[in-house]
Image: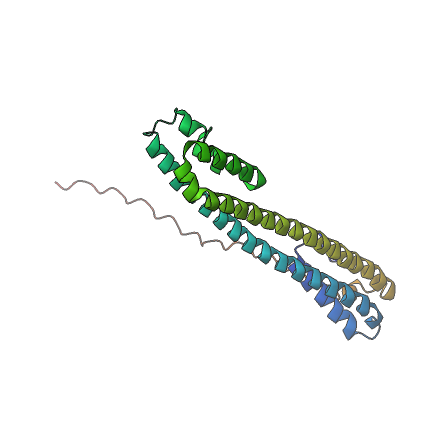
């Protein structure tokens, strides 16, 4: 008997198996009564797969926006840090720099989400104390960009969670279709107890693995026979 694939099979392949099985059942009056439940499971898996694919596309879009928001935010901090460094003559050990960037710029930009937004809030407060002119010009932008980056990251995280949920539903639909294919195998054996070949016709045959083409062996060229030296 053909081995029926389980829910670990990719959705596209399992849908192909199910479609073959459905068409084969429907074509035979003796088995047509088994077809409608297969169609129901096929439709369910098709819809679940479509939902997962759509959710994944949204996740990719949200990821792009999150990456962009983080980049714009970090670039603005690079500009501000250069201004602060100019004031302290590039002496990062001085308080007017250390208070604004206690662990350096990289430590701040390596943060993300709400944690980074809080750190930026503290940084802006110190900027107001030690560099009021820079604060006046850049504080609103820094706070807004930090908030935008947090929102973009959250949107991406939410989109990832939705993909996980929809994929779990897709896996469940896979399991239901696979289970029905196995169940129908038993029903077909009962209908055709003495004709296993006929039962096989209701399941899509596995593609045969192609044997790797072997290069023809070339005969070894014999080594030239040494010629005696001419006198």
Q: Which residue is more in the foreground, 88 or 178? A: 88
- Tell me, yes or no, if residue 113 can be seen here: yes
- Residue at 65 percent across and 57 percent down: it is 52
Q: How many marks?
A: 0
Where is residue 159? Give x, y as percent. 62, 52
* Quadrant showing the N terminus: bottom right
Where is residue 31? Give x, y as percent. 83, 70
Horizontally, is 130 left or right of 208 in the view?
left
* Quadrant showing the C terminus: top left
Horizontally, is 122 left or right of 131 in the view?
right
Q: Which residue is more in the foreground, 224 or 166? A: 166
Name above or below for residue 191 compared with residue 97.
below
Q: Which residue is more in the foreground, 162 or 14? A: 162
- Residue at 41 percent across and 29 percent down: it is 97
- Residue at 34 percent across and 46 percent down: it is 222
- Tell me, yes or no, if residue 201 can be seen here: no
Where is residue 225? Give x, y as percent. 27, 44
Where is residue 36? Give x, y as percent. 81, 69
Q: What residue occupies the far right of the structure in this picture? A: 190
Horizontally, is 181 left or right of 106 in the view?
right
Q: How is the rendered protein coloured? A: rainbow
- Residue at 84 percent across and 62 percent down: it is 189
Q: Which residue is more in the foreground, 81 or 202? A: 81
């Amino acid at each position: 008997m053909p081995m029926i694939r389980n829910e670990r099979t990719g959705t596209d392949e399992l849908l192909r198996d199910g479609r073959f099985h459905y068409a084969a059942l429907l074509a035979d009056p003796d088995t047509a009564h088994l077809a409608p439940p297969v169609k129901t499971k096929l439709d369910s898996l098709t819809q679940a797969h479509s939902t997962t694919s759509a959710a994944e596309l949204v996740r990719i879009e949200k990821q792009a926006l999150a990456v962009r928001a983080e980049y714009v935010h970090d670039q603005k901090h690079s500009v501000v840090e250069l201004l602060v460094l100019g004031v302290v003559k590039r002496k990062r050990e001085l308080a007017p720099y250390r208070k604004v960037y206690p662990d350096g710029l990289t430590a701040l930009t390596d943060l993300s989400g709400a944690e980074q937004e809080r750190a930026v809030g503290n940084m802006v407060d110190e900027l107001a104390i030690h560099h009021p002119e820079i604060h006046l010009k850049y504080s609103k932008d820094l706070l807004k960009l930090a908030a935008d980056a947090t929102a973009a990251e959250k949107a991406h995280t939410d989109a990832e969670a939705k993909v996980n949920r929809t994929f779990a539903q897709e896996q469940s639909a896979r399991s239901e279709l696979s289970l029905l294919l196995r169940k129908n195998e038993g029903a077909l054996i009962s209908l055709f107890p003495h004709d296993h070949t006929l039962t096989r016709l209701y399941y899509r045959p596995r593609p045969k693995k192609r044997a790797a083409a072997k290069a023809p062996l070339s005969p070894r060229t014999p080594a030239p026979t040494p010629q005696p030296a001419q006198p």
